[in-house]
Image (spheres, rainbow, N blue to C red):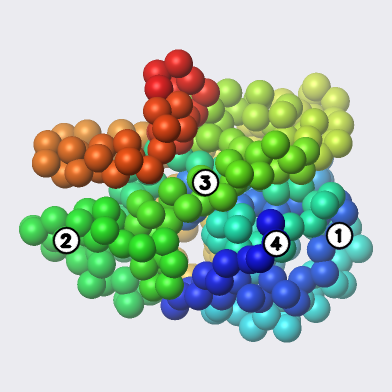
Amino acid sequence: MTQRKFYLGPLTDNRRWDMVDLRPDDVCVVTPPKCGTTWMQTIVALLFSGDPDVETELSVKMPWVDIRIREMPEIADRLDAMTHRRSMKSHTPMDGLPLHDQAHYICVFRHPLDAHFSFRKHLRNIPLPWFDLWYPEDDQEGVTFRRFLDGGPEGFDGDAMPLAHILRHYKAASALADRDNVSMFHYADMSRDLAGTFETVAGLLGIRHSATVMQQLVQAATFDNMKAHAERYAPSGGKGFMKSDSDFFHSGTSGKWHGTLSDRELAAYDAIMDAELAPEDRAWLEYGSRGIGLG
């Protein structure tokens, strides 16, 4: 990757990464929104510590570098002062990030429609009113889904997470997936086999714990446990940023779009997916490892 793309929006400024001095053992969790970011960050935090009761404090200890809300010099200084192994979060596609030869990049994806409906719910829970035109609360005319389909991958559109932004994430990660330090995970696979996900991530990061400790860490990262202790696990949990920390973990299930989107809306979505991705890529992006063979 010789030249990084710019991703600049009301939330995002990927130039902020220029102030981060990446280290060889850093771990960057890179995802579109609502695709399992917090879940994967929690897995990494638990593996780093080996403590199922660790206070993850993701927004402080594993900061979202791209977001404009926090002053970047303060984040850079905090990262520089860390003497332990570090992890950071990004919602910028891989073609907009500095690519270190040894730091590990964990990219997580989810069925685009599941991510979209989760994002709809999420925006009702946070104080970001500039998205109201894209995501009106009373959307009788289907504005939200039309903009999901026709929005661009960058700028304001990118921060509103249209399909084009998810596809840009997927293509940018796939282009680098042959590198030893770039890994791709799927929300559906994490849901089906959380223990296996822990083992895989631990192996990639060179981390070992006893079988007993691993069982405790897996239990800590289950959806039910994270929702029950949302003030600990939600980003900025316990600080009053979100209307409800618990609602950040709304349900964790998939397929909420079934019976909600019209045949015409689904046909428009299918047309874009088929035009943008090979069948095997579409199958994996939607269903993870179980999609293999469906394409």
Q: Give above or below for 55 relative to 60.
A: above
Q: What distance separates the C-alpha of mark 2 from that of mark 4?
A: 38 Å
Name which quarter of the figure residue 132 lies in: bottom left
Residue bearing the label numbered 1 = 23
Q: What type is the residue that disc 2 sits on?
A: Val
Residue bearing the label numbered 3 = 171
The quadrant of the rendering that contains the N terminus is bottom right
Mark 3 Cα-neighbour bin, 10 Å: few <14, some 14–19, many ≥20 = some
Residue bearing the label numbered 2 = 143
Q: Earlier in the sequence, mark 2 or mark 4?
A: 4
Q: What type is the residue that disc 3 sits on?
A: Lys
Q: Give above or below for 246 relative to 22.
A: above
**Callout in the foreground (4, 3):** 4
Q: Earlier in the sequence, mark 1 or mark 2?
A: 1
Most extreme residue toward the top is 293
Q: What distance separates the C-alpha of mark 4 from that of mark 3?
A: 16 Å
Residue bearing the label numbered 4 = 2
Q: Secondary structure at mark 1?
A: loop
Q: What type is the residue that disc 4 sits on?
A: Thr
Q: Earlier in the sequence, mark 3 or mark 2?
A: 2
> Residue 159: horizontal and vertical position, in percent?
42, 67
> Residue 233: horizontal and vertical position, in percent?
59, 52
Are circles 4 and 3 on residues that touch, CB within 8 Å?
no
Q: Nearer the viewer, residue 55 or 260?
A: 260
